[in-house]
Amino acid sequence: MIRHLLENHPAPASPTAAERFERRVAQTAAEETLSRAQFVDLYCVQRRTLAEIAAMIGASRKVTGRLARHHGIAPSAGGPPVDPAWFHHQYVTQRRTLRDLGHEVGRSVSRMSRIAKDYGIPIRPPTDAGNPQSVAIRRLAH
């Protein structure tokens, strides 16, 4: 059974050493071309697509996707990208709700929750979200 599957559907070939080297060279060139601040400006502020950024720097779309992850930004499938520093400041420091942030950037609460998880930001319980009264009660309890 397994032999039959492998004969009819062989595993994809692993990239050669030359292909891996070319990929590293392209990635390094992209990292040297755009700083994090420049990338955030193009992707998060100007809302350029990864394909547009790739064309600007002479790289492939895949390279710019890896560049986004290198800079700590999860590439988005829909809607404008969300800058991790902005998200952290608004959600953690300013204690805004996921609903409020989602409304601002055009995303659902569940999508904002996934973005927080992608950025390693712990989700507050819904009762704590931005409610100064619950914050004060917790402080008195401790």
Image: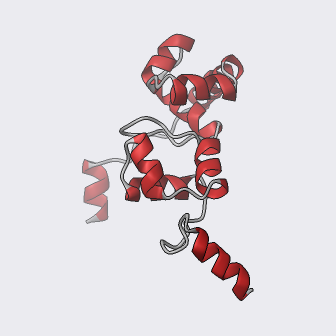
Q: Whole-percent x and y of residue 138?
A: 66, 81
Q: Is residue 22 visible?
A: no
Q: Quadrant of residue 124?
A: bottom right
Q: Residue furthest right?
A: 142
- Residue that appears at 37% across and 42% down: 106
Q: Is residue 66 visible?
A: yes
- The percent position of residue 94, horizontal first and vertical second, equals 63, 54
* Quadrant position of the C terminus in the picture: bottom right
Question: Seen in the image, is 10 located left or right of residue 51?
Answer: left
Q: How many marks?
A: 0
Q: Is residue 35 left or right of residue 17?
A: right
Judge by depth and name the residue closer to the eye, 49 or 44.
44
User: Could you say where residue 8 lies in the image, as x and y percent from the top left?
Assistant: 24, 49
Q: Quadrant of the N terminus?
A: bottom left
Q: Kindly identify the residue that appears in the image at 48 percent across and 37 percent down.
A: 81
Residue drawn 66% across the image and 20% down it? 34
**Colour basis:** secondary structure
Residue lying at the far bottom in this picture: please name it: 141
Residue drawn at x 52%, y 43% is 74
Q: Judge whether 31 appears above or below 104 on screen.
A: above
Q: Nearer the viewer, residue 64 or 108?
A: 108
Query: In the visual, does 30 lie left or right of 60?
Result: right
| Residue 2 figure quarter | bottom left
Give residue 6's position: percent from left, percent from top: 32, 54
Q: In the depicted view, which residue is nearer to us: 138 or 133?
A: 133
Whether 94 is drawn above or below 82: the answer is below
